[in-house]
């Protein structure tokens, strides 16, 4: 594995090369969404310029081309995540829709009053609110894995939290708010012992680690394309084939049926059973191009580069008086997401001041209000790094934070 | 390095109100209270007024949030105290005009410390922070007027 040639790789991302407020842009909001390489932008344009047609139904050349590209993208994504079968890759709008799909199909079908869903306090609202709605509808009960002071799951509590009432454990692979990498195999093993299924929110996981869904052993894995160099509006629900086959459909419409009668219909094979209506064809093809790009760069090399960067950034940030970083102290236990506060400067003020220096970070609760409550915070500032970020950009962040200190000093 | 726009946003007066907010306490004999939150950023205030004879006899708040939202509501409570309801409504209108870039309001001495917030209009994403207290004030005036009609 060779280190990344970041200088060369940055040329692939047109949006990085611009000035914001008179300064060269430093884009550190990758946990919200990543920038897109030219390979993805080009494939979106060429699809619309040359192959645009609806999939799976036209007996004409353009429809054939669109269908082939769309299904090839599914195969690429299946290979990228280590799925046994491309039919296990269901296209959705993103992580949120993937999780809602499971809640509205498997969840409504299986859950009964008194059943339990085990979540964690670290969850993004997208892996929290769908289960709250489902629990209200079914009478199921939500339970929570708590966090320690470093933002790591208190897995010692698992034996008390899991029982034969537990039907599902739904946790994030990597925390978007704290960067914590969860020991998901350990969680899967504990869940299996009580016969519960496991859903992993992989919105950050697939971005920062080389994913092998079969090796992880979970039952559902949900993620979005736009955080991993792909377009917005396309995402994936991966699930084991037999589970998808047993699940009822969610949305009804074209493409998800086999035969339609007056009162009943039969369903198409998986994954099409879950893909009603004209899908985001360009988005799927764009995500296919994104995983080609990431595979060519190398996920292990990307992970090593990010670890190197986050280690450096943590060391430099730790020297700023009044700055507090949340999440695991050991860089090995975290992704390239740094949530922090700085003295009594509110995170929104931090973000405005950094923006005036051309530095994009996120400020707020990061759709993880339970995490904020756990640490007694209203908000944090969050700098999140990706494959194209550099040490020089981490230095710019430190300089920007010195400006915050000089204003709020 | 601080830019001119940044300097105009984070004036000492704003940071001073953020650190030492005026009228920040519960008002025991309040006649109206409005809880206002900005769900996208988590800023929140509870504005409490004691209205007597169509006049704001006292104005206080409790809350938490960024320097802009907290300084703005602190300055606002200073200015509206002992004003008539109509005058308070006029202050809210003029402040909103200033947030939309009206240069005359920024020079209007009757706006008191609030003039220091004129620079916020150059930061569109932060305008909603400055308006949080004034949205609460307008709600409070509306609620008071509705109460009187009943």
Image (spheres, rainbow, N blue to C red):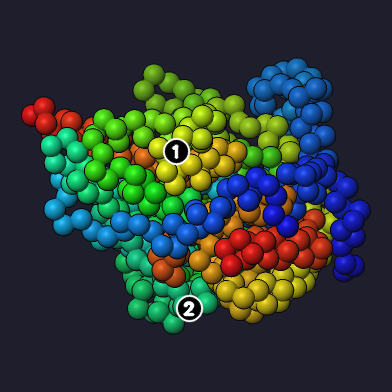
Report whether residue A125 is seen: no
Identify the residue at horizontal 69%, vertical 40% (top origin): A231
Q: CA distance from mark 1 to mark 2?
A: 50 Å
Where residue A281 sits in the image (x, y, percent)? 67, 31
Q: Residue at x 59, y 72 (%)?
A: A323
Badge 2: chain ID: A
Mark 1 packing: few (<14 Cα in 10 Å), some, or many (20+)? few
Comparing B21 with A224, the one in front is B21
Q: Residue at x 13, y 53 (%)?
A: B29
* Residue ranking furthest to the left: B150
Q: Quadrant of the N terminus of chain A?
A: bottom right
Asked if residue B147 lies left or right of residue B2, the reply is left
Residue A26: % across, % down = 75, 53
Q: Quadrant of residue B53?
A: top left
Mark 2: which secondary structure?
loop
Residues tagged by mark 1 and mark 2 found on one chain of the structure: no
Q: Which residue is mark 1?
A: B109
Closest to the observer: A76 or A345? A345
* Residue A230: image location, x then y, percent: 71, 44
Residue nearest the viewer, comparing A69 with A323: A323
* Tally of marks: 2
Identify the residue under disc 2: A149
What secondary structure is marked by label 1?
helix
**For the C terminus of chain A, which image quadrant?**
bottom right
In this orientation, does residue A20 appear?
yes
The part of the image, by quadrant, that contains residue B83 is top left
Q: Residue furthest front?
A: B109
In this rendering, would A249 be left or right of A362? left
């Amino acid at each position: 594995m060779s280190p990344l040639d970041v200088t060369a790789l940055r040329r692939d991302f047109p949006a990085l090369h611009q000035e914001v407020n008179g300064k060269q842009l430093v884009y550190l909001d990758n946990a919200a969404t990543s920038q897109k390489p030219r390979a993805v932008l080009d494939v979106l344009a060429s699809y619309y310029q040359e192959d645009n047609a609806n999939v799976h139904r036209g007996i004409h050349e353009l429809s054939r081309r669109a269908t082939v590209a769309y299904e090839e993208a599914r195969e690429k994504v299946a290979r990228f995540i280590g799925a046994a079968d491309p039919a296990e890759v269901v296209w959705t709008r993103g992580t949120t829709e993937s999780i809602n799909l499971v809640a509205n199909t498997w969840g409504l079908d299986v859950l009964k009053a008194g059943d339990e869903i085990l979540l964690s306090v670290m969850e993004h609202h997208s892996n929290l609110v769908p289960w709250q709605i489902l629990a209200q509808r079914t009478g199921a009960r939500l339970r929570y894995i708590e966090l320690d002071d470093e933002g790591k799951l208190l897995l010692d509590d698992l034996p008390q939290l899991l029982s034969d009432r537990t039907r599902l454990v739904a946790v994030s692979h990597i925390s978007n708010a704290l960067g914590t990498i969860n020991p998901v195999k350990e969680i899967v093993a504990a869940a299996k012992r009580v016969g519960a299924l496991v859903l992993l929110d992989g919105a950050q996981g697939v971005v920062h680690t080389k994913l092998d869904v079969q090796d992880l052993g979970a039952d559902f894995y949900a993620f979005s394309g736009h955080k991993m160099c792909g377009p917005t509006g396309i995402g994936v629900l991966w699930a084991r084939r037999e589970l998808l086959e047993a699940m009822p459909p969610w949305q009804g419409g074209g493409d998800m049926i086999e035969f339609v009668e007056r009162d009943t219909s039969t369903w198409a094979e998986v994954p099409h059973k879950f893909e009603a209506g004209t899908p985001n064809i360009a988005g799927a093809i764009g995500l296919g191009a994104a995983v080609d790009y990431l595979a060519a760069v190398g996920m292990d090399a990307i992970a090593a580069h990010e670890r190197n960067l986050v280690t450096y950034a943590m060391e430099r940030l730790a020297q700023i008086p009044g700055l507090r970083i949340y999440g695991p102290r050991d860089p090995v236990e975290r992704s390239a997401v740094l949530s922090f506060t700085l003295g009594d400067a509110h995170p929104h003020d931090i973000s405005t001041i950094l923006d005036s220096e051309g530095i994009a970070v996120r400020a707020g609760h990061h759709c993880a209000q339970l995490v904020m409550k756990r640490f007694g915070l209203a908000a944090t500032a969050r700098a999140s790094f990706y494959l194209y970020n550099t040490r020089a950009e981490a230095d710019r962040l430190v300089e920007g934070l010195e400006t915050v200190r000089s204003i709020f000093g | 390095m601080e830019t001119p726009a940044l300097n105009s946003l984070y004036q000492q007066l704003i940071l001073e109100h953020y650190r030492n907010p005026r009228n920040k306490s519960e008002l025991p004999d309040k006649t109206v209270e409005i809880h206002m939150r900005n769900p996208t950023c988590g800023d929140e205030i509870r504005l409490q007024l004691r209205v007597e004879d169509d006049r704001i006899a006292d104005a206080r708040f409790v809350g938490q949030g960024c320097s802009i939202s907290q300084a703005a509501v602190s300055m606002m409570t200073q200015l509206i105290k002992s004003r008539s309801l109509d005058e308070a409504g006029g202050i809210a209108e003029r402040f909103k005009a200033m947030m939309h870039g009206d240069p005359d309001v920024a020079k209007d001495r009757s706006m008191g410390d609030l003039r220091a917030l004129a620079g916020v209009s150059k930061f569109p994403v932060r305008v909603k922070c400055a308006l949080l207290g004034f949205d609460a004030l307008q709600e409070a005036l509306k609620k008071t007027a509705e109460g009187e009609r009943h």
